[in-house]
Amino acid sequence: MTFSNKQRNYIEDLIAFDTTSIHSNLDLIDHVTKILERTRARITLNFNPDKTKANLIASIGPPEAEGGVIFSGHTDTVPVTGQDWSTNPYRAVEENGKIFARGSTDMKGFCGLALAAFEHVATEHESKLQKPLHLLLTYDEEVGCIGAQNFVTTNSHLLTKPDLILVGEPTNLRPILAHKGIRCFNASAKGHGYHSSAPDKGVSAIQYNARLSGYVYRIGESLKNEGITDLRFDPSYSTVNVGTIQGGSAVNVVADECVFSFETRPVPGDNGDVLVEKFLAAQEKVQNCFKKAARDTGLELHLALDEYVSVPPFDGNEHHPGSKLLINLLDDKTVGVAPFCTEAGIFQNAGWNSIVCGPGSIEQAHQPDEFITIDQLKRGAHLIEKISHRCFEPA
């Protein structure tokens, strides 16, 4: 197994773009587009609503043929703010068999390898393809898999049903066939401020949202004790957590506003709807109790729930021919589950067979001095090359 200068250069070039999720990824997408325009690849860009970010889908091979392979990776990275880096996080530095940089393992290492492999097939072997080969680069995975959801909603017609979508998140090249989902919410309350010496003349948003935040935990206990159990995970049930709560301006003022944020991480088979239904019922009950108590005051209480992240659980099929192909090519064939979310559940829900497997360790992701080993890159490049051969086989 070798790691070529071209593969190294592509990875280093991708790392050099600061694609933290708060920034645009268009410079990176433009860079990749220019590389692929030298081939016969069919290239489509799928923009976000304000045209500041884009997914890229590049395809070669017979467009109408069933099957084939999609190499899928996200282009965004998490921030480096507040982290103590020994090197410039946006310049790849190789030391002791490792490449240090933000995104080296999550997941520009894989993206660079996939780009190099796709370009090689497109340049040297495109006429031999019996099935399509695709490269999909997405935006905003780190903040809710927004790009992948946009792509599936608006551009899935560009793809015939693939044998495999390889989501190259860092798994140390172990096949991952399941992970929990995540749904995040803001629960807001707007009351009526007043001096705390006469609290009955105000409506405390904190009072009512505190009651509701406690109810979130009671819902969590019901999911733990009565909900779906999946022993592949630890914990084996859908979890709930209230992460932040903010409200009020001073101790002697009745708080007119309060918001708390909570999440659920549902196991496969649970889409989180039960939690939402129970919470909305609790909100309605609190709202009705307030209206009854405040009938003659003229005061109002407004409660709202806003969902800002929704990523479905993933539960892949290890017996699908595409999955079996990948697993058989791996040194470590032990099928596992991931403690983190990916875009695989979105693709699975669209009807595409997906598997999560890529070079690098998730333990390095999001950390200062993030790195990926050259050995993992070599093995990842070898795997990607072998999987692309699937597209040379008759449909």
Image (tube, helix red, strand yellow):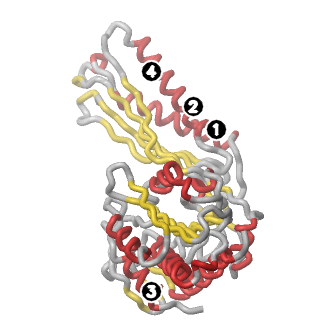
Label annotation for residue 287: 4
Which amino acid lies under the numbered mark 2 shown in the image of this protein?
Answer: Lys
Tell me the CA gap for discs 3 and 1: 50 Å
For residue 298, side relative to residue 374 (left or right): left
Quick one: SS at disc 1? helix
The amino acid pointed to by label 3 is: Arg
Which residue position is annotated with label 1? 222
Measure how far apart labels 1 and 2 are at the Cα level. Answer: 11 Å
Density class for disc 4 (Cα within 10 Å; few <14, some 14-19, many ≥20) is some
Q: Can residue 341 be seen in this view?
A: no
Q: How crowded is mark 2: few (under 14 residues within 10 Å), some or many (20 or more)?
A: some
**Of callouts 1 and 2, which one flags the residue occurring earlier in the amino acid sequence?**
1
Q: Cβ–Cβ below 8 Å for labels 2 and 4?
A: no
Name which of mark 3 and mark 1 comes first in the sequence.
3
Tell which residue pokes out farthest to the front in this image: 127
Which marked residue is nearer to the observer: mark 3 or mark 1?
3
Q: Quadrant of the N terminus?
A: bottom right
Q: Which residue shows up at 47% across the image and 85% down it?
A: 7
For the point 34% across and 34% down, the residue is 258
Q: In this view, does 59 lie to the left or right of 75?
A: right
How far apart in space, not on screen, are marks 2 and 4 (Cα)? 14 Å
Q: Which of marks 4 and 3 is in front?
A: 3
- Which label was assigned to residue 278? 2
Q: What residue would you read off at disc 3? A: 8
Q: Which of the 4 quarters of the picture holds residue 63? A: bottom right
Quadrant for residue 188, please give it: top left
State how far apart marks 2 and 3 are (Cα): 51 Å
Q: Between tags 1 and 4, which lies in front?
A: 4
| In the rendered image, the vertical position of residue 363 relative to residue 257, given as above or below | below
Q: Mark 4: which secondary structure?
A: helix
Task: Identify which residue, 144 or 283, lies in the foreground.
Answer: 144
